[in-house]
Amino acid sequence: MGQPRNYSDETAATIDSEVKRIVREQLERGRQLLTDNREKLEGIAKALLEKESINADELNAIVSPAAAGTTPASSSSDSGTGDGDHQPDSDTPGANGDGSPEPAPA
């Protein structure tokens, strides 16, 4: 950011215009994805409100019931007590299963 640019004002305007176009298109794409998948998002929210955490199998059952071989209503791999005793899946990044990166070794 502190370096002088090596291109013309016209090129800078072209770059700005292209970046704005890309951001605008991706914003619309994101909105469309949310709209198209609203039922799935609501299913995930409902499951999380009921149980506080869900594993990969439960998430897959909500997101694509046909692929998981179950329906969202019958997708429960534990007693459903919501006691917070859920352990992260081994394929979930992060030490606590929330997608955050593992801390660097000391």
Image (tube, rainbow, N blue to C red):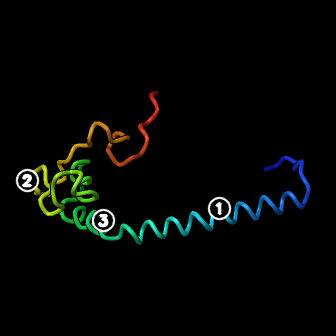
Q: Which residue is mark 3?
A: 40
Which kind of residue does numbered mark 3 sit on? Lys
In the image, residue 106 above or below residue 57: above
Q: How far, Cα to Cα, is label 2 from label 1?
A: 46 Å
Q: Which residue is mark 2?
A: 79
Q: Quadrant of residue 17?
A: bottom right
Image x and y of residue 30, in percent:
50, 65
Residue in the picture at 60% in, 66% down: 25
Crowdedness near tag 2: few (<14), some (14–19) or many (≥20) residues, C-alpha within 10 Å = few
Residue 57 horizontal side relative to residue 4, left or right = left
The residue that appears at 35% across and 49% down in the rendered structure is 98
Q: Position of residue 80 (x, y in %)?
A: 11, 57
Q: Which mark is residue 22?
A: 1
Q: Earlier in the sequence, mark 1 or mark 3?
A: 1
- Of mark 3 and mark 2, the one earlier in the sequence is 3
Q: Residue furthest left?
A: 79
**Label 2 close to label 1 by CB (< 8 Å):** no
Assign a secondary structure to mark 3: helix
Return the disc, 2 or 1, that comes first in the chain's sequence: 1
Residue under the image location 37 percent in, 40 percent down: 93
Residue type highlighted by circle 1: Ile
Give how far apart the Cα atoms at labels 1 and 3 are: 27 Å
Up the image or down, 9 lies above or below 98; here it is below
Q: Which corner quadrant of the image does residue 8 belong to?
A: bottom right
